Image (cartoon, rainbow, N blue to C red):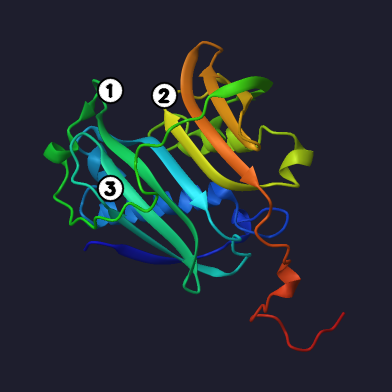
Amino acid sequence: MKILKQQYNVLNSMIDPEFRLTPDSLISLTQDIFARYCSSHWCGAFDLREKNRMWIINDFTFRITDAMPFWTESIDIETWFSEKPAIKLRQDYRLSQNGKVFAIGDCTWAVLDMESRKPLAASDVLPEFELHEEIVLGTHRHRFPQKTEHLLTYRHMTNNNDKDFNYHVTNVSYANICLGALPEDYLSSHELHEFSIKFLQETFIGQELQCQVSRTATPDLWTYDMTSDGTTLACQAYAQYGEPYSREGILDRNLPFRNTNKQI
């Protein structure tokens, strides 16, 4: 199997106030299909745990190229591995709705020994995957912009809602902290076009994460430096915002489950 294809529906828990799929839900879906792919090859998270190993995520980048789908709508996700793994495994993916692509991205994974907390060579501990040599973003090496001016510091005390099945803070929580840090009036008038994050250090429940948000020389391009307890750099990210892709609302769509006889 070169490419795994999976259809998902946008659930109520995945939407923003405009009833569209949220970026953190997009992240979660791309990681769900990664888990399905690996589990089909007997190297899912539960398989690795039996061998005292675990999956860790090194980085991910995605680009939103069109309007996000609405609640209840179905989307198709394709994922594949585009390079033969050495230490790390590189996942590429594409999200579409009715054949129209609305997001693309990539992700880098590694296998960690749970005792030493050191990465193992993926080529030694994983099965040989069939490759599909398409790199959707053109490169897996994403350059981070230089910050020019500090804007604000956002603080988050980690709790059990941030914990993943490896018992540390989940990568989606880091992304959520970054993407929620900018002021509400800015976020309500701009739409995320691209996001990239690289993870540098594990953090655990009960630690305070401090997210330093800075401007760059490019309009609407922001950088994020997140530390744990004010000292250790846990991750770095950037986000490019822009104009909304669509002004269409959910009531402009045909909702097939609706009663054809409007009663109110």
Q: Give the label on residue 117, or none.
A: 1
> Disc 2 marks which residue?
202
Does dot 2 land on a helix, a strand or a loop?
A: loop
Q: Note whether 34 is above or below 163 in the view shown.
A: below
Please give left or right for residue 65 compared with residue 82 in the image. Answer: right
The residue drawn where x is 63% and y is 24% is 214
Q: Residues within 10 Å of mark 2 (few under 14, many from 20)?
A: some
Residue 131 at x, y = what percent?
Answer: 20, 55
Q: Earlier in the sequence, mark 3 or mark 1?
A: 3
The residue drawn where x is 34% and y is 57% is 79
The residue drawn where x is 22% and y is 39% is 50
Does dot 3 land on a helix, a strand or a loop?
A: loop
The residue drawn where x is 29% and y is 56% is 134
> Given the image, on which type of amino acid does mark 2 rest?
Glu
> Disc 3 marks which residue?
44
> Given the image, on which type of amino acid does mark 1 rest?
Arg
